[in-house]
Amino acid sequence: MVAAGHASGKLSLQWRKGLADTVHSGSPRVAIVGGGIIGCLTAWRLRLLGARPVVLERGQLGDESSWAGAGILSPIHPWLYPDAFSAMVNASLALYPGTMQELEQAAGIPVEWRRNGLMIPMFADDRIDHAPQASDWSARFGWPMEQLSAEEARDREPALSPAVQGALLWPEVGQVRNPRMLQAAYLAMRATGVELRQHVEVTGLMERGGAVAGVRLADGEEVPADAVLLAAGSWSGGLSEAMGFSLPVRPVKGQIVLLHCDPGVVRHIVKHDEAYFVPRLDGRVLVGASLEVMDRDARKMRGARPFLFANLKAGKGVAEIAHFIAEAGGVDVLIHRPGNGP
Ligand SMILES: Cc1cc2nc3c(=O)[nH]c(=O)nc-3n(C[C@H](O)[C@H](O)[C@H](O)COP(=O)(O)OP(=O)(O)OC[C@H]3O[C@@H](n4cnc5c(N)ncnc54)[C@H](O)[C@@H]3O)c2cc1C
Protein backbone atom coordinates (compact mmCIF):
# COMPACT_ATOMS: atom_id res chain seq x y z
CA MET A 1 0.00 0.00 0.00
CA VAL A 2 1.69 3.18 -1.09
CA ALA A 3 0.46 6.60 -2.24
CA ALA A 4 0.88 10.34 -3.12
CA GLY A 5 1.89 12.22 -6.26
CA HIS A 6 5.24 11.30 -7.72
CA ALA A 7 6.98 9.59 -10.63
CA SER A 8 6.29 9.94 -14.30
CA GLY A 9 3.01 9.66 -16.12
CA LYS A 10 4.78 7.14 -18.36
CA LEU A 11 4.87 4.52 -15.63
CA SER A 12 1.28 5.23 -14.81
CA LEU A 13 0.33 4.62 -18.44
CA GLN A 14 2.31 1.38 -18.51
CA TRP A 15 0.38 0.18 -15.49
CA ARG A 16 -2.91 1.00 -17.13
CA LYS A 17 -1.80 -0.67 -20.35
CA GLY A 18 -0.92 -3.80 -18.38
CA LEU A 19 -4.43 -3.96 -17.01
CA ALA A 20 -5.89 -3.23 -20.43
CA ASP A 21 -3.86 -6.08 -21.95
CA THR A 22 -5.31 -8.41 -19.34
CA VAL A 23 -8.79 -7.73 -20.61
CA HIS A 24 -8.02 -7.65 -24.34
CA SER A 25 -10.10 -10.70 -25.11
CA GLY A 26 -13.57 -9.41 -24.47
CA SER A 27 -14.69 -10.02 -20.92
CA PRO A 28 -12.28 -12.49 -19.33
CA ARG A 29 -12.94 -14.04 -15.97
CA VAL A 30 -10.14 -13.29 -13.51
CA ALA A 31 -9.81 -15.31 -10.29
CA ILE A 32 -8.29 -13.08 -7.60
CA VAL A 33 -6.80 -15.02 -4.71
CA GLY A 34 -7.04 -12.88 -1.58
CA GLY A 35 -9.39 -10.10 -0.54
CA GLY A 36 -6.89 -7.64 0.95
CA ILE A 37 -6.40 -4.14 -0.45
CA ILE A 38 -4.42 -5.45 -3.43
CA GLY A 39 -7.05 -8.00 -4.43
CA CYS A 40 -10.00 -5.67 -3.83
CA LEU A 41 -8.64 -2.60 -5.61
CA THR A 42 -7.46 -4.66 -8.56
CA ALA A 43 -10.84 -6.38 -8.82
CA TRP A 44 -12.59 -3.01 -8.93
CA ARG A 45 -10.24 -1.67 -11.62
CA LEU A 46 -10.53 -4.84 -13.71
CA ARG A 47 -14.30 -4.66 -13.51
CA LEU A 48 -14.21 -1.07 -14.76
CA LEU A 49 -12.14 -2.28 -17.71
CA GLY A 50 -14.78 -4.88 -18.56
CA ALA A 51 -13.33 -8.04 -17.01
CA ARG A 52 -15.32 -10.35 -14.75
CA PRO A 53 -13.23 -10.68 -11.58
CA VAL A 54 -14.12 -13.02 -8.76
CA VAL A 55 -12.44 -12.35 -5.40
CA LEU A 56 -11.76 -15.54 -3.44
CA GLU A 57 -11.05 -14.84 0.22
CA ARG A 58 -10.21 -17.47 2.83
CA GLY A 59 -11.57 -15.43 5.74
CA GLN A 60 -13.37 -12.11 5.60
CA LEU A 61 -12.47 -9.39 3.11
CA GLY A 62 -9.83 -6.98 4.39
CA ASP A 63 -9.31 -8.63 7.75
CA GLU A 64 -5.57 -9.20 7.60
CA SER A 65 -2.60 -6.84 7.18
CA SER A 66 -4.50 -4.41 4.94
CA TRP A 67 -6.68 -3.61 7.94
CA ALA A 68 -3.93 -3.73 10.57
CA GLY A 69 -1.42 -1.59 8.67
CA ALA A 70 -0.66 2.02 9.53
CA GLY A 71 -1.42 3.45 6.10
CA ILE A 72 1.85 5.38 5.77
CA LEU A 73 2.36 5.99 2.08
CA SER A 74 6.12 5.67 1.93
CA PRO A 75 8.73 3.25 3.15
CA ILE A 76 10.07 4.60 6.44
CA HIS A 77 13.77 4.38 5.60
CA PRO A 78 13.74 3.88 1.82
CA TRP A 79 17.48 4.50 1.50
CA LEU A 80 18.01 1.16 3.23
CA TYR A 81 16.25 -0.65 0.34
CA PRO A 82 17.41 -1.28 -3.25
CA ASP A 83 16.78 1.60 -5.68
CA ALA A 84 14.39 -0.57 -7.69
CA PHE A 85 12.08 -0.58 -4.69
CA SER A 86 12.07 3.22 -4.52
CA ALA A 87 11.30 3.38 -8.24
CA MET A 88 8.35 1.05 -7.74
CA VAL A 89 7.13 3.08 -4.77
CA ASN A 90 7.26 6.30 -6.77
CA ALA A 91 5.38 4.68 -9.65
CA SER A 92 2.70 3.48 -7.24
CA LEU A 93 2.44 6.86 -5.56
CA ALA A 94 1.88 8.51 -8.94
CA LEU A 95 -1.40 6.60 -9.22
CA TYR A 96 -2.81 7.66 -5.88
CA PRO A 97 -4.31 11.11 -6.45
CA GLY A 98 -6.44 9.98 -9.41
CA THR A 99 -7.23 6.54 -8.05
CA MET A 100 -8.26 7.77 -4.60
CA GLN A 101 -10.46 10.44 -6.13
CA GLU A 102 -12.20 7.85 -8.31
CA LEU A 103 -12.49 5.47 -5.39
CA GLU A 104 -14.10 8.07 -3.16
CA GLN A 105 -16.54 8.97 -5.91
CA ALA A 106 -17.41 5.34 -6.54
CA ALA A 107 -17.82 4.50 -2.86
CA GLY A 108 -19.26 7.76 -1.60
CA ILE A 109 -17.01 7.83 1.49
CA PRO A 110 -13.69 9.58 2.19
CA VAL A 111 -10.54 7.47 2.56
CA GLU A 112 -8.66 10.25 4.36
CA TRP A 113 -5.78 10.32 1.91
CA ARG A 114 -3.63 13.35 2.76
CA ARG A 115 -0.04 14.51 2.84
CA ASN A 116 0.75 15.51 6.41
CA GLY A 117 4.48 14.80 6.14
CA LEU A 118 6.90 12.36 7.72
CA MET A 119 9.28 13.54 10.42
CA ILE A 120 12.30 11.71 11.82
CA PRO A 121 13.43 13.49 15.00
CA MET A 122 17.07 13.21 16.05
CA PHE A 123 18.39 12.73 19.58
CA ALA A 124 21.86 12.71 21.15
CA ASP A 125 21.87 8.95 21.69
CA ASP A 126 20.62 7.93 18.21
CA ARG A 127 22.24 4.73 17.00
CA ILE A 128 22.16 5.84 13.35
CA ASP A 129 22.57 9.26 11.74
CA HIS A 130 20.17 8.97 8.82
CA ALA A 131 20.77 12.51 7.49
CA PRO A 132 23.51 11.84 4.86
CA GLN A 133 21.81 8.83 3.23
CA ALA A 134 18.37 10.39 3.53
CA SER A 135 19.51 13.57 1.85
CA ASP A 136 21.16 11.69 -1.02
CA TRP A 137 18.11 9.43 -1.52
CA SER A 138 15.67 12.36 -1.43
CA ALA A 139 17.62 14.22 -4.11
CA ARG A 140 17.84 11.17 -6.37
CA PHE A 141 14.17 10.18 -6.09
CA GLY A 142 12.64 13.65 -6.16
CA TRP A 143 11.35 13.95 -2.60
CA PRO A 144 11.70 17.42 -1.03
CA MET A 145 13.42 17.05 2.36
CA GLU A 146 14.01 19.68 5.06
CA GLN A 147 16.62 19.51 7.80
CA LEU A 148 15.18 21.23 10.88
CA SER A 149 16.94 22.65 13.93
CA ALA A 150 15.70 21.61 17.38
CA GLU A 151 13.66 24.78 17.65
CA GLU A 152 12.12 24.37 14.18
CA ALA A 153 11.33 20.72 14.89
CA ARG A 154 9.46 21.57 18.10
CA ASP A 155 7.73 24.44 16.42
CA ARG A 156 6.37 22.14 13.70
CA GLU A 157 5.70 19.23 16.10
CA PRO A 158 5.10 20.62 19.60
CA ALA A 159 4.61 17.16 21.11
CA LEU A 160 8.30 16.33 20.58
CA SER A 161 10.50 15.91 23.65
CA PRO A 162 12.56 18.98 24.64
CA ALA A 163 15.61 16.73 24.24
CA VAL A 164 15.17 16.67 20.45
CA GLN A 165 18.26 17.96 18.62
CA GLY A 166 16.78 18.43 15.16
CA ALA A 167 14.67 16.55 12.63
CA LEU A 168 14.38 15.45 9.02
CA LEU A 169 11.05 16.30 7.42
CA TRP A 170 9.48 15.09 4.17
CA PRO A 171 6.42 17.36 3.83
CA GLU A 172 4.95 15.43 0.88
CA VAL A 173 4.76 12.01 2.51
CA GLY A 174 1.15 11.03 2.96
CA GLN A 175 -1.11 8.52 4.58
CA VAL A 176 -4.43 6.87 3.98
CA ARG A 177 -6.82 5.57 6.59
CA ASN A 178 -6.48 2.00 5.45
CA PRO A 179 -9.63 0.57 7.08
CA ARG A 180 -11.61 3.31 5.29
CA MET A 181 -9.85 2.55 2.01
CA LEU A 182 -10.84 -1.11 2.40
CA GLN A 183 -14.42 -0.12 3.09
CA ALA A 184 -14.38 2.13 0.03
CA ALA A 185 -12.92 -0.67 -2.10
CA TYR A 186 -15.69 -2.98 -0.88
CA LEU A 187 -18.39 -0.44 -1.74
CA ALA A 188 -16.81 0.23 -5.15
CA MET A 189 -16.66 -3.50 -5.88
CA ARG A 190 -20.30 -3.90 -4.90
CA ALA A 191 -21.31 -0.94 -7.04
CA THR A 192 -19.59 -2.36 -10.11
CA GLY A 193 -20.80 -5.91 -9.63
CA VAL A 194 -17.58 -7.70 -8.68
CA GLU A 195 -18.27 -11.27 -7.57
CA LEU A 196 -17.15 -11.73 -3.95
CA ARG A 197 -16.70 -15.09 -2.28
CA GLN A 198 -15.61 -15.20 1.36
CA HIS A 199 -14.59 -18.20 3.48
CA VAL A 200 -13.20 -20.11 0.50
CA GLU A 201 -9.57 -21.22 0.52
CA VAL A 202 -7.61 -21.53 -2.70
CA THR A 203 -5.21 -24.46 -2.62
CA GLY A 204 -3.82 -24.62 -6.15
CA LEU A 205 -4.09 -23.88 -9.83
CA MET A 206 -6.13 -25.67 -12.46
CA GLU A 207 -4.30 -26.26 -15.72
CA ARG A 208 -5.51 -27.20 -19.17
CA GLY A 209 -3.21 -27.80 -22.10
CA GLY A 210 -0.28 -26.31 -20.22
CA ALA A 211 -2.17 -23.06 -19.54
CA VAL A 212 -3.71 -21.75 -16.33
CA ALA A 213 -7.42 -22.55 -16.37
CA GLY A 214 -8.51 -21.39 -12.92
CA VAL A 215 -8.04 -22.28 -9.28
CA ARG A 216 -8.93 -25.16 -7.01
CA LEU A 217 -10.53 -24.66 -3.60
CA ALA A 218 -9.92 -26.60 -0.38
CA ASP A 219 -13.25 -28.45 -0.70
CA GLY A 220 -12.33 -29.62 -4.21
CA GLU A 221 -14.45 -27.06 -6.10
CA GLU A 222 -12.89 -25.79 -9.29
CA VAL A 223 -13.26 -22.12 -10.22
CA PRO A 224 -12.55 -21.70 -13.93
CA ALA A 225 -10.81 -18.48 -14.98
CA ASP A 226 -8.95 -17.02 -17.94
CA ALA A 227 -6.38 -15.45 -15.63
CA VAL A 228 -5.40 -15.76 -11.97
CA LEU A 229 -4.08 -12.98 -9.76
CA LEU A 230 -2.22 -14.11 -6.67
CA ALA A 231 -2.90 -11.40 -4.05
CA ALA A 232 -2.70 -13.49 -0.90
CA GLY A 233 -0.41 -11.07 0.96
CA SER A 234 2.08 -12.75 3.23
CA TRP A 235 0.65 -16.15 2.28
CA SER A 236 1.58 -15.67 -1.38
CA GLY A 237 4.99 -17.28 -0.83
CA GLY A 238 3.60 -20.58 0.45
CA LEU A 239 0.74 -20.56 -2.03
CA SER A 240 3.05 -19.93 -4.96
CA GLU A 241 4.92 -23.13 -4.10
CA ALA A 242 1.63 -25.04 -4.05
CA MET A 243 1.00 -23.54 -7.50
CA GLY A 244 4.33 -24.71 -8.86
CA PHE A 245 6.47 -21.60 -8.75
CA SER A 246 8.33 -19.67 -6.09
CA LEU A 247 7.82 -16.13 -4.81
CA PRO A 248 10.20 -14.86 -2.11
CA VAL A 249 7.46 -13.32 0.07
CA ARG A 250 7.90 -13.30 3.83
CA PRO A 251 5.48 -12.13 6.52
CA VAL A 252 6.48 -9.15 8.65
CA LYS A 253 4.98 -8.80 12.08
CA GLY A 254 4.38 -5.52 13.92
CA GLN A 255 2.42 -4.26 16.88
CA ILE A 256 0.03 -1.33 16.73
CA VAL A 257 -1.99 0.48 19.39
CA LEU A 258 -4.64 3.12 18.68
CA LEU A 259 -4.75 6.06 21.11
CA HIS A 260 -7.67 8.46 21.44
CA CYS A 261 -6.28 12.02 21.53
CA ASP A 262 -7.55 15.46 20.61
CA PRO A 263 -6.96 16.42 16.96
CA GLY A 264 -3.61 18.14 16.46
CA VAL A 265 -1.75 16.61 19.41
CA VAL A 266 0.49 14.89 16.85
CA ARG A 267 0.65 16.64 13.47
CA HIS A 268 3.03 14.61 11.31
CA ILE A 269 3.80 10.97 10.87
CA VAL A 270 6.68 10.71 13.35
CA LYS A 271 9.18 7.89 13.24
CA HIS A 272 12.01 7.18 15.61
CA ASP A 273 13.92 3.92 15.92
CA GLU A 274 11.29 1.18 15.79
CA ALA A 275 8.37 3.35 16.89
CA TYR A 276 6.09 5.40 14.68
CA PHE A 277 3.12 7.66 15.31
CA VAL A 278 0.42 8.24 12.69
CA PRO A 279 -2.15 10.92 13.54
CA ARG A 280 -5.62 10.50 12.02
CA LEU A 281 -7.90 13.41 11.20
CA ASP A 282 -10.21 12.74 14.14
CA GLY A 283 -7.33 12.91 16.63
CA ARG A 284 -6.70 9.20 16.98
CA VAL A 285 -3.01 8.37 16.94
CA LEU A 286 -1.84 5.03 15.75
CA VAL A 287 1.35 3.97 17.50
CA GLY A 288 3.38 1.22 15.91
CA ALA A 289 6.48 -0.56 17.06
CA SER A 290 8.80 -3.42 16.21
CA LEU A 291 8.96 -4.99 12.80
CA GLU A 292 10.01 -8.62 12.74
CA VAL A 293 10.47 -10.61 9.56
CA MET A 294 8.98 -14.05 10.11
CA ASP A 295 9.96 -17.25 8.52
CA ARG A 296 7.00 -18.38 6.47
CA ASP A 297 3.40 -18.42 7.38
CA ALA A 298 2.02 -15.54 9.44
CA ARG A 299 -0.55 -17.79 11.10
CA LYS A 300 2.02 -20.42 12.03
CA MET A 301 4.49 -17.85 13.30
CA ARG A 302 1.75 -16.11 15.25
CA GLY A 303 1.33 -19.43 17.01
CA ALA A 304 -0.91 -19.40 20.04
CA ARG A 305 -0.84 -15.63 20.28
CA PRO A 306 -4.15 -13.96 19.56
CA PHE A 307 -4.51 -11.72 16.52
CA LEU A 308 -5.23 -8.61 18.53
CA PHE A 309 -6.37 -6.34 15.72
CA ALA A 310 -8.79 -8.64 13.98
CA ASN A 311 -10.35 -9.74 17.25
CA LEU A 312 -10.75 -6.24 18.61
CA LYS A 313 -12.19 -5.04 15.34
CA ALA A 314 -14.82 -7.73 15.42
CA GLY A 315 -15.46 -6.99 19.08
CA LYS A 316 -14.45 -10.53 19.90
CA GLY A 317 -11.55 -12.19 21.64
CA VAL A 318 -10.83 -9.57 24.30
CA ALA A 319 -11.19 -12.21 27.03
CA GLU A 320 -8.77 -14.51 25.18
CA ILE A 321 -6.25 -11.69 24.83
CA ALA A 322 -6.51 -10.81 28.52
CA HIS A 323 -6.09 -14.49 29.36
CA PHE A 324 -3.02 -14.73 27.12
CA ILE A 325 -1.42 -11.68 28.75
CA ALA A 326 -2.19 -13.03 32.21
CA GLU A 327 -0.76 -16.44 31.33
CA ALA A 328 2.39 -14.76 30.03
CA GLY A 329 2.73 -13.14 33.44
CA GLY A 330 2.16 -9.61 32.15
CA VAL A 331 -0.62 -8.16 34.31
CA ASP A 332 -0.61 -9.39 37.85
CA VAL A 333 -2.51 -6.30 38.89
CA LEU A 334 -5.52 -7.38 36.89
CA ILE A 335 -5.56 -10.92 38.11
CA HIS A 336 -6.27 -11.67 41.73
CA ARG A 337 -4.32 -14.75 42.64
CA PRO A 338 -4.45 -16.21 46.16
CA GLY A 339 -1.48 -14.91 48.12
CA ASN A 340 -0.91 -11.94 45.83
CA GLY A 341 -2.59 -9.54 48.16
CA PRO A 342 -5.14 -6.97 47.02
C1 LIG B 1 1.41 -3.75 11.69
C2 LIG B 1 1.54 -3.43 10.22
C3 LIG B 1 1.75 -2.12 9.82
C4 LIG B 1 1.89 -1.82 8.46
N1 LIG B 1 2.03 -0.52 8.09
C5 LIG B 1 2.10 -0.19 6.78
C6 LIG B 1 2.20 1.17 6.37
O1 LIG B 1 2.20 2.08 7.18
N2 LIG B 1 2.29 1.42 5.03
C7 LIG B 1 2.28 0.43 4.10
O2 LIG B 1 2.36 0.73 2.89
N3 LIG B 1 2.18 -0.87 4.46
C8 LIG B 1 2.07 -1.19 5.77
N4 LIG B 1 1.95 -2.50 6.14
C9 LIG B 1 1.96 -3.51 5.10
C10 LIG B 1 0.61 -3.54 4.39
O3 LIG B 1 -0.43 -3.59 5.35
C11 LIG B 1 0.57 -4.75 3.47
O4 LIG B 1 1.68 -4.72 2.60
C12 LIG B 1 -0.69 -4.77 2.62
O5 LIG B 1 -1.84 -4.59 3.42
C13 LIG B 1 -0.76 -6.06 1.87
O6 LIG B 1 -2.01 -6.12 1.23
P1 LIG B 1 -2.43 -7.46 0.54
O7 LIG B 1 -3.77 -7.25 -0.08
O8 LIG B 1 -1.32 -7.90 -0.37
O9 LIG B 1 -2.43 -8.56 1.72
P2 LIG B 1 -3.49 -8.88 2.90
O10 LIG B 1 -4.16 -7.68 3.43
O11 LIG B 1 -2.78 -9.75 3.87
O12 LIG B 1 -4.58 -9.72 2.14
C14 LIG B 1 -4.31 -11.01 1.67
C15 LIG B 1 -5.59 -11.80 1.80
O13 LIG B 1 -5.39 -13.08 1.19
C16 LIG B 1 -6.14 -14.01 1.93
N5 LIG B 1 -5.62 -15.35 1.67
C17 LIG B 1 -4.42 -15.85 2.05
N6 LIG B 1 -4.30 -17.11 1.60
C18 LIG B 1 -5.43 -17.40 0.93
C19 LIG B 1 -5.91 -18.55 0.24
N7 LIG B 1 -5.17 -19.67 0.15
N8 LIG B 1 -7.13 -18.52 -0.34
C20 LIG B 1 -7.91 -17.38 -0.26
N9 LIG B 1 -7.50 -16.27 0.39
C21 LIG B 1 -6.28 -16.27 0.96
C22 LIG B 1 -5.94 -13.58 3.38
O14 LIG B 1 -6.95 -14.10 4.22
C23 LIG B 1 -5.98 -12.06 3.25
O15 LIG B 1 -7.27 -11.53 3.50
C24 LIG B 1 1.82 -2.83 7.48
C25 LIG B 1 1.59 -4.15 7.89
C26 LIG B 1 1.44 -4.44 9.23
C27 LIG B 1 1.16 -5.87 9.63
Image: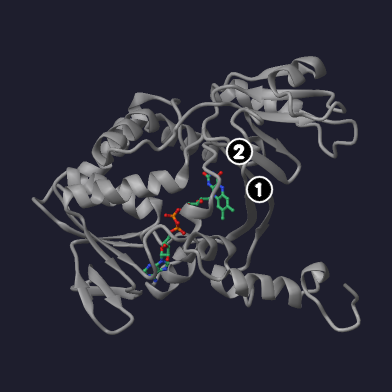
Image quadrant occupied by the C terminus = bottom right
**Would you call the spot at circle 2 few (<14 residues within 10 Å), some (14-19), or many (20 or more)?**
many
Picture layout, residue 286 above or below residue 253:
above
Provide the residue designation for mark 1. 288
Asked which quadrant contains residue 207, the reply is bottom left
Residue 238 place in picture, x, y as percent: 48, 70
Residue 205 place in picture, x, y as percent: 30, 73
Q: Secondary structure at mark 1?
A: strand
Question: Contact, CB < 8 Å: mark 1 with mark 2?
Answer: yes
Q: Name the residue: 34% across, 75% down.
A: 204
Nearer-N-terminus badge (1/2): 2
Side of 341 where 70 appears, left or right: left
Side of 127 where 268 appears, left or right: left
Provide the residue designation for mark 2. 278
Mark carried by residue 172 = none
Residue 19 place in picture, x, y as percent: 25, 44
Q: Name the residue: 52% across, 31% down.
A: 174
Asked which quadrant contains residue 136, the reply is top right
Picture layout, residue 310 above or below residue 181:
below
Q: How is the image coloured?
A: one colour
Side of 282 where 217 appears, left or right: left
Residue type, mark 1 in image? Gly
Q: Is mark 1 within 8 Å of ligand 1?
A: yes
Side of 36 where 118 appears, left or right: right
**Would you call the spot at circle 1 few (<14 residues within 10 Å), some (14-19), or many (20 or more)?**
some
Residue 273 place in picture, x, y as percent: 76, 42
Q: Is residue 297 visible?
A: no
Q: Is mark 2 within 8 Å of ligand 1?
A: yes
